[in-house]
Image (tube, rainbow, N blue to C red):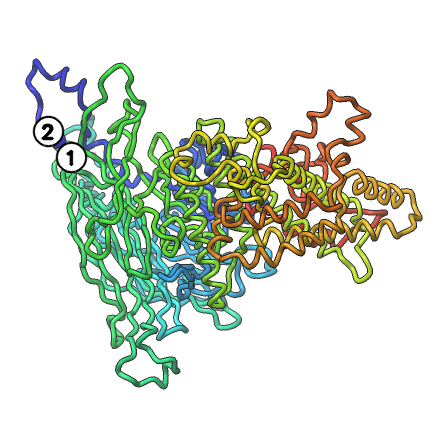
Amino acid sequence: MYPDARNSPSKGKAKQADAQNWHSHWWDFHPLADHLKRPVAWSNASTIFTPHPSQPLILGRLFSSSKQFIIVSPDQILNNPAAYEPPNVITVSSNDHWLFAYFPGRDRDGVGCLWQRGYSIDKWNIRDYWACQRGAGIVNAMFVGAEREWVTCPDGSTTRLTQSGPLTPVSNPTLLTVTQAHQLNVYFLRTYAPGVKSLTCSLMQPCYAGENMSQVTHDPPRGPKTSRLCSAASLSFIFHDRTRLAESVFMVAMRSRRYPLSDTLRAAASDSSHDLGLSLDMPVDNQLDDRPPLLDWNSYEEEQMIELCEVKLRFDGMYMFIVAAPLSPIYHPGPCLTNFMFVSVPASKPDTFTSPKTSPTKDKQPQRGQLELPTTYLVASFLDFEEYASLPKSRIVAYSIVRVVPPNGKIPWAARLVGDRSFSPRILTVAAPGYLSIATRKITVIVAITNPGGSLPRGAAKPKDIPVGNLFALQLPDLSNDPDYDHPSILAPVNRTSSDCPLSIFTSPNKLLACAVSMLQTSVYTLPRARITSGSKDTLHQLPLAQALTIALQSRRSTADISHILSLPSTSATMLHDTLFGTLTSYEVNTRLGTANSFTMVDVMGVAVEIYRARARQTQNEDEKERYLMLSRNALNVCSVSACFAAFEDCKESEGYDLEPVWQLISLSTWVVAFLEDLMKECVFLADLADPTPNTSLNPNEVMPKEEPMDDNPFLRNWLTSPFQQATDQSPHSVLLSAPILLHLVHPLALTNLRAVVFHVSSFHQYLASMTAKRENSQFARDTMLDLISSSGLDLKVLEDILSTAIPEASAMPVEEVMASFAEGHPVPAQHEQLKKTIRSLTTSSAIDRPRLFIKSSDLVDGFANLSASDRPVGDDPGMDVVTKGRLLTQNPSLLCLRCGGRSQVGGEVMIAGRSSPRWKTWERMWTARCICGGSWVSGNI
């Protein structure tokens, strides 16, 4: 039971009670009623945008790193920063290419600014900005043009929802804004047009406006000595009705407040009755009788209704048009609105088991599944401070807004109260849209509930933060707690338990985390998670994290929040593997059903790079850290081999290779040979550990390890110290065969890519060797490639033949075992026999020249003191370009990958003898937006 903040303890116990407990007061929550805005936006590239606490600037933070940057404001603001407030509206487009913010002016017009992103996610350039008159400041904004959302089905496949929002084929971007004057402004950039254009229409009366029509300024609403200004607004795109695919509708909800007019303010200022210096017998001017009434408290009253407006944005092939139609308002007695938002639910599809596969227009059978129309919910929360003598009472309501069927000209939409809930004595502070499950038709709202008080920690070791509330997932439409989800705690510093109420909240791209902003700090919380544990392999694709990862890959958005959850110490390693396995299962199901996948298996391995590096940062165990770093390096090698293969394919010609980027291809060949050397060394180590004397008690084909050389193997150390050793029959040599680098010899995709890149390096070597160098540069390139192959100790032709022979056997492995090895990041026991066979073929053939493989001529020349220089794992050289595998030039700026930590200088001109290489440039441009691992680029100087 929470302590009652209204009851005062006795005088002798007052200090003792205050020292042991904390209490909230009504003024702690009054900023919510005053609509003090500190907006936050979390982009699909995992960038958190927040306003500066006191200056007209936007701060960007790259989650989940500590890197921050500042977005430059327009010159009009920079030249006079004291004249503008921090932005109260921040929104980012779904493709993360556009950013908009509104800066209110201090006794002057505000400024709205539009930024466009560069190649790196921390570079934003001002595209245009414009002034907004006082009384017409922007209250809310939203970009048009979101792509159709992906959802998962119970069988693991993925599908797309219907279109949400209008289509704008000739404008990019298209921005919707709602102003204090109850107007909707549409700002858009026409293709190839120099500047931003705009359309304006009223949301208080029927309005029709178009590009080819003259803009009419609507008169402000007239009232009795007060002016109505929109204080809060919400926009929502409605999922397309399958029966009305030609129509695209979005809703606007507004909450208004009454303010005194300017003449009322002047009359109050000039009121002679307030001038005590006047004589009592002075004659009163007759004109004062016509002045407006004096101000009273009700002049600032918030109207107890929510106004709705249906808006259609149309395009006729040449021009854009807006059609606005106000709807009946929703009346609610809540005095202080703190949150309100739309939550849209798509129409359900007919049941495929009962619906015949015929044309919908010709199908008249009664057993056909009926289409359920899309539903939109309007969720609003209120605070009632009553007499400002106690804590406010918190309430949340939900209204369903559905299209009237059959359509009625006067009432096209119907609003009905479907949920009403009170949280007293706890207080609801902020809310945000939650999860959407198409399979179960479940949709939720995330709310933050604050306690009225609690106990302070006791003892010498006091924590810095204590729980002050919880995050809940409320089911729509009845707003009850979702029993399938937990309710994580909200933490606050001990010295600010009740004085720092969050003012806004925004969920991460994959609905796993939330960023809350208060007056003093910005916090990231874990959202309620489903109470579901790992199950059988047949149901792993139904895990919430696996579904979230599948949708993130299909939607091409950041997976940083998923990696953050999987890297937490509370998340088991089994959950990590099950999540990757479930994602691979969905990939296989889509492939089997013929559904197009927006991602490849290499993209899944790129996500594994991020997850392994995140877990390595979180763990305190050195062996575990080294193990995850090995898995991360090998996962990145899988991505590198695939990228090198694509580069050679792009530069291949009918009779050879394009020699304009010859040095770039040599850099790739150098990396491939170094990687093959590491792989072959691992094979030789395992072959040397074999006991040539058959043991009658054991399988004669078993590889028996020696104990001494493997003391430094983190996989073996973890196996020897883990309880898994006693729980399974796995022997030490099985652990040695599970080295991550050996995955390239057993997984069909990794093995196929490795064989292909070996073929290209061998062919490129033979092509250069057969040519007669005509110039000095060509001679140097030819000699460099010949020396690289001759000193490697590898016969690439024989190696290619052995790898080609191993591909059919690797492909014949059961699909579950193949996916398990990819999810684990190393070979699984079912692949060990095939792996041992491949190792024997490699080590007993002429593919490996052991003296040249282990002893390099540079080691003999430089002395044994430099032998340790080759101990650095492949890909860990900080001076190497992670994409081109060349050396980074110190005089040129570089890009940093947030996922793998690699650096690159892709995008520069490749000039050979005064000519550029179009083939190589085409391949490089593939990686200007993302790294080879799929991570986002940031500038290297952050």
Residue contact between numbered discs 1 and 2, judged by CB atoms under 8 Å? yes
Residue 708 visible in the current orientation: yes
Res. 391 mark: 1
The answer to which of marks 1 and 2 sits earlier in the sequence is 2
Tell me which amino acid carries mark 1: Leu
Tell me which amino acid carries mark 2: Arg
Res. 6 mark: 2
Residue sitting at x 11%, y 30% = 4
Residue sitting at x 53%, y 46% = 827
Query: Is residue 369 shown left or right of residue 112?
Result: left
How many marks overall?
2
Residue 518 position within the rendered picture, expressed as x and y whole percent measured from the top left: 33, 34
Residue sitting at x 80%, y 38% = 791
Relative to 706, residue 437 above or below: below
Residue 75 visible in the current orientation: no
The quadrant in which residue 209 appears is bottom left
Disc 2 residue crowd, few under 14, some 14–19, many 20+, Cα 10 Å: few
Residue 656 position within the rendered picture, expressed as x and y whole percent measured from the top left: 81, 57
> In the rendered view of the protein, which quadrant contains the C terminus?
top right
